[in-house]
Amino acid sequence: MNHLRHGLSVGIERMGNDFFLSLKVVGKLTHADYQIITPMIDSAIATLKDPNVDVLIDATELEGWELRAAWDDFKLGLKHNNEFNKIALVGNKNWQEMAAKVGAWFISGEMKYFENMTDATAWLKK
């Protein structure tokens, strides 16, 4: 039996109303992955008054999304659009860089693509 590794791991840190979310995405994301992660993110953000969220996404092992999962990702971004300050996407594929550019159209904060974690983290700390 062949089991393909996929999913999301999440790290959440809070300092007052500043909120740092780190995501590691692996394989091809599914709708079931978003059914687990979305309530966690919603709950964490709901506890903050006027949240200011910085996000670090490690997509170096991301292979893509199922169609329904891509829609889930889009809805999650729209739902929390005004709460995102900066989103750093670390990847290693051309389509990931394009996804970051398109994603930036749908959030009020900044979104930027990086090829290494050091540069992404430095940008988030500015």
Image (tube, rainbow, N blue to C red):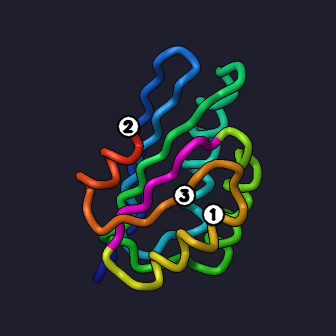
Q: Secondary structure at mark 1?
A: helix
For residue 111, the mark is: 3
Identify the residue position indicated by label 2 in the image: 125
Q: Nearer the viewer, residue 39 or 110?
A: 110
- Lower position in the chain sequence, tag 1 or tag 2: 1
Residue lying at 70% horizontally and 66% vertically, measured from the top left: 105
Mark 1 surroundings: few (<14), some (14-19) or many (≥20) residues within 10 A: some
- The vertical placement of 77 against 46, above or below, is below
Mark 2 surroundings: few (<14), some (14-19) or many (≥20) residues within 10 A: few
Q: Distance of mark 3 from mark 2, alpha carbons? A: 14 Å
- Lower position in the chain sequence, tag 3 or tag 2: 3
Residue farthest top in this picture: 16
Residue lying at 59% horizontally and 41% vertically, measured from the top left: 85
Q: Nearer the viewer, residue 16 or 42?
A: 16
Identify the residue position indicated by label 1 in the image: 104
Q: Nearer the viewer, residue 2 or 90?
A: 90
Which residue type does callout 2 highlight? Answer: Lys
- Residues under numbered marks 3 and 2 in contact, where contact means CB atoms less than 8 Å apart: no
Q: Where is the C terminus found, in terms of image quarters?
A: top left
Q: Secondary structure at mark 3?
A: strand
